[in-house]
Image (cartoon, rainbow, N blue to C red):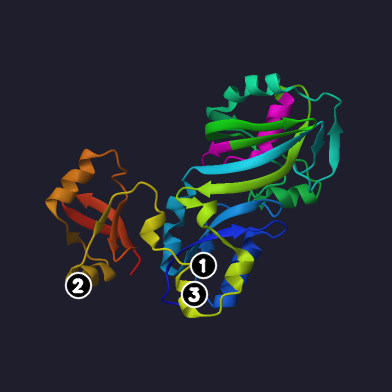
Amino acid sequence: MSEIQGWINLYKPKNISSFKAINKIKKHFSFKKIGHAGTLDPLAEGILPVAIGKTTKLIPFIQSDLKCYKFTVYWGTQTSTDDTDGNVIRRSHIIPNLKDIKNNLNKFIGFNLQTPPKVSAVKINGQRAYILARRNKDFKIPEKQVYVKKIQLLRHHGHTTTFYIECGKGFYIRSFARDIAMLLGTYGHVLSLERVKVGNFVKETSILLDDLLKISERHDLFNCILPSVSMLDDILAYEINDRKDIVDLSFGKSIMIKEDFAKALFSKKNDKKNIFLSSKGDIVSIGRLIGNLFIPYKILI
């Protein structure tokens, strides 16, 4: 099956790490190359884009897509992990009301600085933060810029509030729960977390991990694998059919593309550094244009 490439829109269940989920798929189908975009915490569930074969080279382009989450914050306690997996480290009798929560949501919209949780995969001097935290090491995680497009309050009842958020790469929901609670004069942690969308990957068309692992027939597997070009959000891809162009690209050679495509590309607000070529629904190369000369720097043939 090493020749198979494309995307699987996987729905990862709770209580399994993203790495273990991917490893189960790799072993079950004997894939030589497999990867995922955007790690989900073990306690989180939801969309985990999985790349098969040479499509793994496209993972960086999925990583930058906007992601949507539905999650619930529990007010009044802070944990060592900022979710239900950790020990309670602080308590407060203050439970924010609906009006105060709504009035503070806009403060998180747009670009802001955020400090990742101490139990996270962020590297501190070459070491993962969660490893240092387990060893009870004293360390600080630097702030980083994150982006939030939209926040909605879906439900508020007693000690819990459920939100929907659309955010960019590197945004931590656990940090948001911690920070908004502190802004409201109390403590908080994530009670439940579900990722419902990553770019073009949506919950409605995803496949459960258990259902995927039940597949044994090659034909049924193909039905679960999406073409590599289909999941790249809002890109302009040039379709090539000429056999000579495909052969030249496979050797890393530059090829000429039609002038009308080059003009269309440069008339739009696209990332001019990353030009995509496709063939029969799959990305075959990524490169740059000089005039209408395509110069490849990644080959997926």
Q: CA distance from mark 3 to mark 2?
A: 30 Å
Q: Is residue 258 magenta?
A: no
Which residue is under mark 1?
Answer: 34
**Magenta-highlighted residues:** 165-182
Rendered image quadrant of residue 226: bottom left
Q: Amino acid at mark 3?
A: Asp
Question: Can you tell which of label 3 and label 2 is closer to the viewer?
Answer: 3
Q: Amino acid at mark 2?
A: Arg
Which residue is under mark 3?
Answer: 220
Q: Secondary structure at mark 3?
A: helix
Question: Can you tell which of label 1 and label 3 is closer to the viewer?
Answer: 3
Q: Is 227 in front, or is 129?
A: 227
Q: Residue at x 77, y 22 (%)?
A: 185
Q: Is residue 178 magenta?
A: yes
Q: Is 187 in front, or is 207?
A: 207
Mark 3 Cα shell of 10 Å, populated few (<14), some (14-19), many (≥20): few
Which residue is under mark 2?
Answer: 243
Q: Residue at x 33, y 48 (%)?
A: 235
Is 64 left, or right, of 191 in this rendering?
Answer: left
The image shows residue 76, relative to residue 235, as above or below, that is above
Rendered image quadrant of residue 180: top right
Is 4 left, or right, of 98 in this rendering?
Answer: left
**Quadrant assignment for the C terminus:** bottom left
Q: Residue at x 46, y 48 (%)?
A: 199
Q: Secondary structure at mark 1?
A: strand
Q: Residue at x 80, y 25 (%)?
A: 95
Q: Is 295 in front, or is 209?
A: 209
The image shows residue 117, relative to residue 185, as above or below, that is below
